[in-house]
Image (cartoon, grey):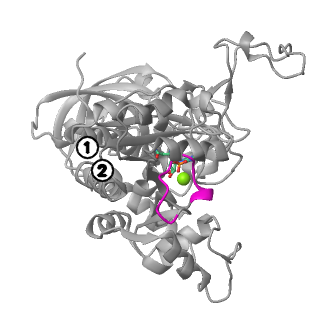
Amino acid sequence: MKHTKVIEVLQSDQLLQPVTIKGWVRSFRNDRFIAVNDGSTINNIQCVIEDNTINQEIVDRINIGAAIAVSGTLVESEGKGQRVEIQVSAIEIEGDANPEEVKKTILSPKRHSLEKLREQAHLRVRTNTFGAIMRLRSKLSYAVHDYFQKNDFHYVHTPIITGSDAEGAGEAFKVTNMDLNNIPKDENGNIDHSKDFFGRETNLTVSGQLEGETYAIGLGQIYTFGPTFRAENSNTSRHLAEFWMIEPEIAFCDLDGNMDLAEDFIKYVIQYVLDNCQDDLAFLENRLVQEDKQKPQAERSEMLLRDKLRFVLDNNFKRVSYTEAIEILKNSKPNKKKKFKYPIEEWGADLQSEHERYLVEKHFKCPVILFDYPANIKAFYMRLNEDGKTVRAMDILFPGIGEIVGGSQREERLEVLQEKMAALDIPEEDLWWYLDTRRFGTCTHSGFGLGFERLVLFVTGMSNIRDVIPYPRTPLSAEF
Ligand code: 4AD
Ligand code: MG
């Protein structure tokens, strides 16, 4: 039987017409009122059974969680908050859900903590909150492609398995097909990678940037959008071992152009969800309002979710050099009583998330682009400034999130890059192909990486990154 999506039925003005929907039972009251959700929208459709129209055997199987097909007539609803409902003429049960078993899961109709939902990550998409988050995630992905495709960027699929560690932070997961109980070693006791699948040491990509650069030097402007892996042991609400990153790379573009692109891009995708995901945003906003009511006044958010998104659209991101930021931080405290856990004492210190969040949330009170960082706290490929000690790096900091984007203008001068690599003990033979971009038609170029889950966190107002990806990968947790 052909069926219609609930989202279409709810918007339909075809009253008194026959309709069939298929979905999962969210609630069933008085043996009459079934609320069905099919994932197409946060809203359920109410299906009303008139007395004795449906066989009692079927009625008994209408349990929360069951998959059902409902046919009937679309009629105006007298219920609150719904325009239409289905007057039921037939019900088919496609998949039962045993109520005793359901009670033991998060499908049971009561408030479950987010921690509890994480333990049943395979079922949590059937809750309103996760339905809304995952639809928003999907729409945001679409908006990412939409933005770059409309602006003539080419989508490049950089490899997942690579021989390079772009960020040089030693956080790469190794890839091997060798028998771990019997690893071949050479006479010095070092692992003999010539016996490995690829004949060399390889790892999962920590960033598609280096390969992306080689493609920008040819296609002009490209972007990647794919999974990225980091074995950093940071068990925080902002880090995943597997996350998705968007990395544009643009030839003939300097750091200012890179900042303009990042700001324009972020604003575009936020505007896109404001225009296209009203119901889900309204639901998540209300969820936050309810959550706030449980908190002491001082901890409540100052802005509603959608106002927070509009605020980003309406304000220019504040561009501040690292040096200016350090001056501000040296003379600041997060609040009257407390000092920073890591007080900033001198120029050259790396910023912690407490500093980043102070700058954004307390000092500037808007998104901030920090640029021109000390060379020795940033990756090797960033362009050295004339001062010889800072590089053309930029990080974008967001309220509630901290760093959402990391990027830079790249070092396009072969000799300078070679010197930098030598100083960091990065062997040229490992990156000969990367250096070739500087040998054959090198040019000014720039790019950045945006952590997709951090964007989803911001847009949904959720506070833990584990709740914005279907199956989070974090230290000691990869069950599903
Ligand atoms: O600042 P990062 O390390 O920059 C790079 O990887 C560059 N190669 C990007 C480029 O220029 N093409 O990472 C970029 C962004 C961060 O700002 C953050 O949003 C996100 O990726 N990110 C993570 N997100 C979730 N979990 C983690 N473990 C993350 N590490 C980085
Ligand atoms: Mg970074």
Tell me if label 2 and label 1 are in contact, CB under 8 Å.
yes
Q: Looking at the rendering, which quadrant does residue 69 occupy?
A: top left
> Could you tell me which residue is drawn at 65 percent across and 68 percent down?
349
> Could you tell me which residue is drawn at 37 percent across and 30 percent down?
215
The residue lying toward the viewer, choosing from 259 and 300, is 259
Amino acid type at circle 1 is Tyr
165 above or below 198?
below
Query: Residue 448 vs residue 422: left or right?
Result: left
Does the closest atom of ligand 1 sit within 8 Å of the Cβ of label 1? Answer: no
Check disc 2: other Cα within 10 Å, few if <14, some if 14-19, many if 20+: many
**Is residue 97 rendered magenta in the image?**
no
Callout 1: helix, strand or loop?
helix
Image coordinates of residue 407 in percent, x first then y, are 45, 51
Q: How many marks?
A: 2
Image coordinates of residue 122 in percent, x first then y, are 56, 32
The label number, if any, that marks residue 147 in the structure image: 1
Sequence-wise, the earlier of marks 2 and 1 is: 1
> Mark 2 to mark 1: distance in Å?
8 Å
The residue lying toward the viewer, choosing from 194 and 154, is 194
Query: Residue 295 vs residue 66: left or right?
Result: right
The residue beneath circle 2 is 269
Amino acid type at circle 2 is Val
Callout 2: helix, strand or loop?
helix
Image quarter of the C terminus:
top right
Q: Looking at the rendering, which quadrant does residue 220 occupy?
A: top left
The magenta stretch is 375-387
Image coordinates of residue 126 in percent, x first then y, are 47, 38
The residue lying toward the viewer, choosing from 191 and 226, is 191
89 above or below 364?
above
The label number, if any, that marks residue 420 in the structure image: none
For the residues carrying marks 2 and 1, which lies nearer the camera in this image?
Answer: 1
Check disc 1: other Cα within 10 Å, few if <14, some if 14-19, many if 20+: some
